[in-house]
Image (cartoon, grey):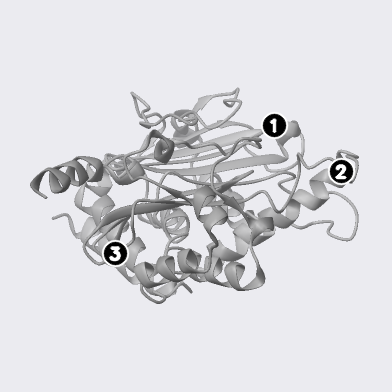
Amino acid sequence: MDPLIMKLATYLILALAMTLSVQSQDIVSSAEKFINLLDTKQKGLTLFPFDTDERYGFHYFPIDDRKGIPWDQLSDDQKTAALDLMRTCLSDSAVKKVKQIMELEILLKALEQRSSDDHFRDPGKYYFTIFGLPGAKTIWGWRLEGHHVSFNFSVQERKLVAGTPAFLGANPAVVQEGPQKGKEILKEERTMGFDLLHSLSKAQLQKVIFSSSPPHDIVTSISRKAAIDHPAGLKFTELSQEQQQLMLRLISLYVHRFTKLFADNMLKEIQDAGLNNLWFAWSGHTEPGIGNPHYYRIQGPTIIIEYDNTQNDGNHLHTVVRDLNHDFGGDLLLQHYQSDHKN
């Protein structure tokens, strides 16, 4: 292996130790505790078969018919159990971002001058849904979803095997007025993206920018199968060692939305598929700020990461991680059917 690639691979592994996330208590036990705290009516809202098409529902915009039990219908004890379940799959920083995005609904409601009885923007409309029966030998999953939040987890025999599609967004991306002026929930995603862009030479910029007009939203959208036919921009091998490290740090930021154990597995798959097969692409403005809509993407054989800040004149941010092998659990549904057939 090329010495540079070996060095970068070592950097990638060492970078994992920087995460604040820790593996929490057992995911199955946490799910069972949450379920056991629900009453019969709440269970009817929360529990679905693993093989239902609803498991593939992926909506990061506000909708009225989302399935699951909403946050505002949970008691304090149930909310504590729900947060414990989140921490078995998400890093501390990701849990914090989810909470902040939920709270941002209050600000957005005020900015849009909605009445008190208008619940289109509502921090209580974030839903927990469980698919299948959590157990030591079962295949099951769960989803956390609401406006600008969507995580889709799949579990096999106590092991988290998938957490994507994984979406976080913020509107406004940067609060412009009031007591929270300057608040920017996804600041690292912006600054680290621009750090990589601004490290590029003029010749590299000509290649990395694939369009002066950024897409209106993430390109993979809410598709069940994420696909972008042709990678754009600069290949990993066209970056300097310093630039490659910036790119790996950016990838690590997104992957570490999950717990360290799961992030380790994702990063290993990215590495095993070949760091040289990664691409970085940009479109739109090359400087941050309101009025400068922009978009970037990282793409490889196993992963697509998208960042889109184009709506509301470049102050409405969408980010997503798609695992091309394991979105919605990959082939777990087939294994589920095979297991049922054997039984």
Q: Amino acid at mark 3?
A: Gly
One can see residue 234 in this view: yes
Q: Is residue 24 above or below residue 148?
A: below
Q: Residues within 10 Å of mark 1 (few under 14, many from 20)?
A: some
- Left or right, 57 with respect to 179, comes to left
Q: Quadrant of the N terminus?
A: bottom left
Dot 3 or dot 1, earlier in sequence: 3
Q: 218 or 203: nearer the eye?
A: 218
C-alpha span from label 1 to label 2 = 26 Å
- Check disc 1 and report its element: helix, strand or loop: helix
Query: Around disc 2, counting alpha carbons within 10 Å, would you say few (fewer than 14), some (14 to 19), or many (20 or more)?
Result: few
What type is the residue that disc 1 sits on?
Gln
Q: Mark 3 packing: few (<14 Cα in 10 Å), some, or many (20+)? A: some
Circle on res. 291: none
The image quarter in which residue 326 lies = top left
- Relative image position of residue 335 (x, y in whole percent): 17, 45
| Residue on which the image places disc 3 | 135
